Image (cartoon, grey):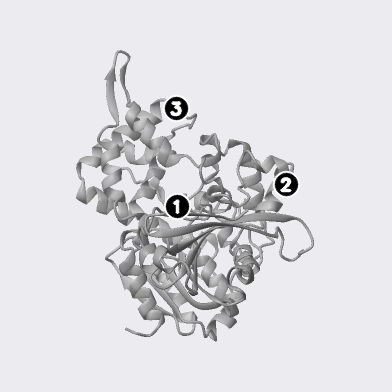
Amino acid sequence: MTVTYRQPGVVLTDRHFTVPLDHDDPAGETIELYAREVVASDQAHRELPWLVYLQGGPGFGANRFVGKQAWLGRALQEYRVLLLDQRGTGHSTPANRQTLPLRGGPAAQADYLALFRADAIVRDCEAIRAEVTGGAPWTVLGQSFGGFCTVSYLSHAPEGLTAALITGGLPSLDAHADDVYRAAYPRIERKVTAHYARYPQDVERARRIADHLLTHEVTLPNGYRLTVEAFQSLGILLGGGEGSHRLHYLLEHAFVRTPSGTALSDAFQEEAQGLLSYAGHPLYALVHEAIYGQDDRPTAWSAERVRAEFPQFDAAKALSGDDPLLFTGESVHPWTFDCDPALRPLRETADLLAARTDWRPLYDPARLAVNDVPVAAAVYHDDMYVDTAHSLRTARAVRGLRTWVTDEFEHDGVRAGGPRVLDRLLALARDEV
C-alpha cells in the first residue's frame, strides 16, 4: 500500500518493492524493499529527475529526515529523492538475531547474508528503477559504504546512472581486508593522538577506566559485557566531526563513589551501551569485513589478526608503563559477538562468513577505465574510516572522476556540511568548477 503524507516543506511517499533474494535466480525467493520518496511541497506535481541515496554502513537504513534537513534541502531544489533502506536494513526485510533463525541454522544464515553486499544492492536499485522512474536513469548519492555501492554501480550497471556523487566512500578496487586494516590502525593512532592533544586530561581518564575494566567484570544495563577492548572501540567516535568532543564528555563523568567503592557511573554506562550496541544495526557487524571480500582468500577476522601487528593497541601493555591507552575505530572482532547480546546468537554465523572464500568481484576496473558517467567524489583528508590513499588511487582508475579533497570535514561531512557538500559535488559532476 502506498501512503503519502507531509512534513514541513516536503511531501513523503512510502514505497514498497519486491525483488529477488538472489538476482541470479529471478524466479526464486523474493524479499521486500522499502524506500521513502521525498519531494519539495512546491514541486510535488512537477516532473523532476530522480536522485537515489545510498546510506553508509553497511547495515544502516536511510536517514529519517524531518523536513529539509542536511543535504536533502539542496537536493530537493531539483530532484525527487528516494531514500532507500538497503536490503537487510530499516524496513527492507531486516536481518537480525530475531529474524535470521527463520532461515535455519548458522550455515543457512551465512549463505543468506552473503547476498547482502554492494553487488546485490546495485541490482536491487536496477530492479526498482523502472518502476520508480519509468526506466529513465537516475543520479545516485553514496555516503561511505553507499559510495562503495556507487563504484559497484558504475562497474556493473552504469547505464542506470545520469551521474554519481560520492562522499567519503571511494573504496580500493583490489585491497584485501588485511590491506584495509593495515592502513587503518596508523590512521586511528593519529586520531587518538590528536584527541589527547586537544584534551590532555583524557589520557589519565582513559587509563583509569581501562584499569578498572581489566580488574572488574562490568555488564552494562542491556547485558553488554564491557571489556577493555570494547571500551577501546569507542574510538569509532573519533572519525566524526564532533566525535572527539563527544568522547571527552563521555570520559569526564565515568566514575562515582558508592558505599561499595568507586564504580562506573550509571550515566557513563547508559551512554556507552548506546554507542556500543549493534541492536539497531546488526548487519554492520555481520558483513562488515565481507564488504571487502573479492578473491579466493577469506577475510578471517582481519581486523583482529592485523591488530596483533600493532602492539601499541594492547591495553595491558600500555597500562604496564606510562603509555596512553589507544582507542580503536571502525572494526569488528570475534569478541564483539561475545560482548553484545544482540549479536551473541549470531557468532557462528559470523565465523562462517569470515571463513567464506567464494566472493564475487565487486568492481570492474576495465569498465571503470572507460567510464562515461559524470562522477564527483568528496575525499576527506586523513579520513579515519576510508583510507585517503586508497580513495585517490581509485579516483585515478575511474575515467572522468573528479575529486574534492578537503580537510574541512571528517567522514560525516555530508551531514555536517550538508547543502554545501552536495552543491560542490553537483558542480564538479557538471564540470562547472
The residues tagged by marks 1 and 2 sit, at their Cα atoms, a distance apart of 33 Å
Q: Give the amino acid type for the residue marked by disc 3 in the picture.
A: Pro
The residues tagged by marks 3 and 1 sit, at their Cα atoms, a distance apart of 27 Å
Q: Give the amino acid type for the residue marked by disc 1 in the picture.
A: Arg
Task: Write down the residue under mark 2.
Answer: 107
Of all residues, the one furthest to the top in this rendering is 259
Residue 64 circle label: 1
Say what secondary structure mark 3 lies in.
loop
Image location of residue 422, percent across then percent down:
36, 70
Image location of residue 419, percent across then percent down:
33, 66
Residue 330 visible in the picture: yes
Q: Which residue occupies 57% across, 39% down?
A: 343
The residues tagged by marks 3 and 2 sit, at their Cα atoms, a distance apart of 31 Å
Please tell me which residue lies in front, 153 or 75: 75
Tell me which label, 1 or 2, sits earlier in the chain. 1
Residue 311 relative to residue 130: left or right: left
Please tell me which residue lies in front, 38 or 374: 38
Q: Please rate how many residues cluster around mark 1, counting C-alpha atoms within 10 Å: few if below 14, some from 14 to 19, many from 20.
A: few
Task: Write down the residue under mark 3.
Answer: 221
Q: Which residue occupies 63% across, 53% down?
A: 1
Say what secondary structure mark 2 lies in.
helix
Say what secondary structure mark 1 lies in.
loop
| Residues under numbered marks 1 and 2 in contact, where contact means CB atoms less than 8 Å apart | no
Q: In this view, does 103 lie above or below 219?
A: below
Q: Please rate how many residues cluster around mark 2, counting C-alpha atoms within 10 Å: few if below 14, some from 14 to 19, many from 20.
A: some
Q: Give the amino acid type for the residue marked by disc 2 in the picture.
A: Ala
Residue 229 visible in the picture: no
Image location of residue 317, percent across then percent down:
37, 40
User: Residue 345: which quarter of the image?
Assistant: top right
Please tell me which residue lies in front, 430 or 234: 430
Tell me which label, 3 or 2, sits earlier in the chain. 2
Q: Which residue occupies 33% across, 41% down?
A: 318
